[in-house]
Image: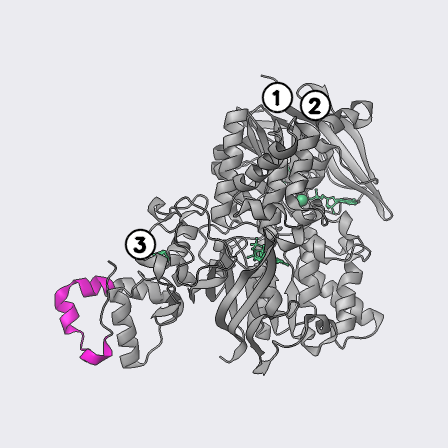
Amino acid sequence: MSQLLEAIDLVKRFPVRVKGRKKLLHAVDGLNFHIDAGETVGLVGESGCGKSTLVRLLTRTLDITDGHVRFRGQGIGLIAARAMADHPLRREIQMVFQDPTDSLNPRYTARQTIAEAVCLLTDTRGTAAIDSAVEEAAAHVGLPPELLDRYPHQLSGGQKARVGIARAIVVKPRLLVLDEPTAALDVSVQAVILQLLDRLKREMNMSFLFVSHDLNVVRLLCDRVMVMYLGQIVETGPAREVFARPLHPYTRALIASLPGGHGNDADLLVGGDPQSPIDPDAHRCRLFGRCPRGAERCETQFPPLREISRGRSAACHFVAPTEGDVYVDAALALHQIDVDPARRATVATEFERLASMATLVQAVPLPDDSLPAPQYRP
Amino acid sequence: MNPLLSVENLSLEFRTRSGIVRALENVSLQLPEGGSLGLVGESGSGKSVLSFAVLGIQDAAAKITGGAIRFAGNDLLADGGSAMKNMRGRELAMIFQNPRVALNPIRQVGQQIEDVLLRHTALRGAAARARAIECLSDVRIPDPERRYTAYPFELSGGMCQRVMIAIALACKPRLLIADEPTTGLDVTTQAAIMRLIRDLGREKGMATLLITHDLGLARDFCDNIAVMHAGHIVEVGATETLFRVPAHPYTAQLVRATPVGQERLEALASIPGNLPDLRRSDLPPCRFSERCELRSATCATPLPTLTASAGHVVACHHPQARTSS
Ligand SMILES: Nc1ncnc2c1ncn2[C@@H]1O[C@H](COP(=O)(O)OP(=O)(O)OP(=O)(O)O)[C@@H](O)[C@H]1O
Ligand SMILES: Nc1ncnc2c1ncn2[C@@H]1O[C@H](COP(=O)(O)OP(=O)(O)OP(=O)(O)O)[C@@H](O)[C@H]1O
Ligand code: SF4
Ligand code: SF4
Ligand SMILES: [Mg+2]
Ligand SMILES: [Mg+2]
């Protein structure tokens, strides 16, 4: 797969005033990641951690403080947010906004809103052709045709959300960025939309960046997930694997607090407020103070994001590959095989079980130097 | 016991250029002091319209064509709804579905909370400000002193939502209507907010009408659940009963469409068909009938209200669980 979008050391700081003094709020703090063509990447994290800010940087509707963004190999970080309205890139990257009420023009009917995108951003011309494009998009998102001639204030929350999604997909972009698209949708419409996204991905090789608080949806829809905390990525990996076996304490806390979940209470965040995003201490882990595992070291030494096993990274001093991980990675490297990322967790568990039977461990023929030294949690 | 809120056979229409939208028809529900009722149902089924009607905020095109709304024994629709205006904000508070629109964009969020306190409580000056900051910290807004002076655009979507919640809870209302209060929030913040609402319910006897698409949340939080479809309440019952033995075919499908515990995207059952066009003059008595697998000839006759068990009622000719009428 080829990289469609790449972010390098991406930074956004907002100037704020605290008791009259000028300070900087680090909303997005040095992010590195990529999105492949045809890939669905989920972005989850606490409210206020910088997800919408990141989305606005990528869609170039907010100016970047520092760092780079590449789209199909070209640097796009310097395009001014103001110039974006007329930029050819708008056709390639489309966006569905967090608050549908905010982003719909109150004086346009649903039909006019979607038709405007068709006229401005596609080559479709002629009333009949535009109308049929609009109706097709509306049908895709499960918006009944009789609602097309209503104004936003005459639509329910979920109906407005579907207008926003229809407007974005009618352009057939390469990258579709969705900020909480299903928050206003009921489960039934949500299922329709998720299945639609999945189909667009397969049929058109469309890529998605999918911001959501609904971990169950991310698990089902996304290939890969990035977990953010206070402006930084703290964990990434194949979605199913991350949810099956979260590594970072923050991810573990997220999963443990799912309603009706079967999480472990010991994983929940401990009391205390999150650290301030204003001029944060660069030598301290951002989760320190709320982390159930925090230790002295976390206060004085910053844990960078590092690879734990193939395709999985986490930013915590105390996350280490399990023996299973070590064996899987070594075996994969040795035999140059690929394990379906969705099945890795199962394979790793199986390896761990095998590894715990000492005789078998010795029977696995691995050259010593191909084995990263196993590390253990303290 | 007399319910705190009682909606009785409420019907409401919107007059639009293309016809009359029959958004609510014969809707009834009850909520006791300190109780919690979940209102669930497909998008567009009338949940927000119902809660706006209770609060007396309506589009000019809306018309209540029948029924009554009683709050603590008072008829809220009497004398043109002026009884309601007095209670709004103090006894009856609402968390709106779209927080940014409900907040004043050019006023600092802390002041917006203080405005409510000044209007409805005896707090003044520094005491009001201190209480406003306390409200912000109650909803887990980090660094509340600083956020007091923030404008809505400087806050994330979820923070605006929490400010809305803080405003609604500031005066410790007797009834809170929460329209999708936590959809924009991550699970940890969501859990904290729901705990706050529940604690207020226990300590102050605040009743909560929770409107949500998240059946898991409704299940965790509510004593009872009412299911809405196309302007009708189709089923009401105790939460566990409703999830375990849903009687209405629509409820059963909603429960099946929930992603919790599903392994594959394809396994998510969507509910076939759409809500009927509410402008049609030939709407069938059962508005679900065009989507229902169990439909029979009887379904074209007026709907019965059956009691499946104590406190569990369903409006359907062929409920799925055993019933006695
Ligand atoms: N001002 C209006 N004029 C005409 N129709 C309206 C008006 N306001 C709402 N409606 C219609 O009434 C129905 C119920 O809307 P409501 O906002 O109550 O839905 P909801 O159940 O809250 O849905 P959601 O979960 O999507 O928020 C919808 O079909 C909507 O299009
Ligand atoms: N224009 C602005 N000026 C100052 N601070 C801002 C501005 N926009 C955002 N912020 C701050 O940046 C941080 C990140 O906000 P952002 O909207 O990206 O969060 P988010 O992760 O999308 O949260 P949510 O899940 O609640 O939508 C927040 O602390 C917010 O207050
Ligand atoms: S580095 Fe320390 S404080 Fe940070 S997440 Fe890991 S254990 Fe917690
Ligand atoms: S009344 Fe008939 S059509 Fe309506 S839900 Fe019940 S079985 Fe289905
Ligand atoms: Mg956001
Ligand atoms: Mg609504």
- Looking at the image, residue B271 lies above or below residue A324: above
Q: Is residue A68 visible?
A: yes
Separation of marks 2 and 1 at Cα, in angstroms:
9 Å
Question: At numbered mark 2, what does the secondary structure look like: helix, strand or loop?
Answer: strand
Residue located at (58% from left, 28% from top): B207
Q: Which tag, 2 or 1, sits closer to the chain's start?
A: 1
Question: At numbered mark 3, what does the secondary structure look like: helix, strand or loop?
Answer: loop
- Looking at the image, residue B138 lies above or below residue A90: above
Q: Which residues fall within the magenta stretch?
A: A352-371
User: Are circles 3 and 1 on residues that touch, CB within 8 Å?
Assistant: no
Q: Amino acid at mark 1?
A: Pro
- Mark number displayed over residue A295: 3
- Looking at the image, residue A285 lies above or below residue B104: below
Q: Which circle, 3 or 2, is nearer the viewer?
A: 3
- Asked if the residue at label 3 sits under 8 Å from ligand 3, the reply is yes
Q: Nearer the viewer, residue A194 or A224?
A: A224
What is the chain identity of the residue bearing mark 1? B
- Mark number displayed over residue B3: 1
Q: Quadrant of residue A84?
A: bottom right
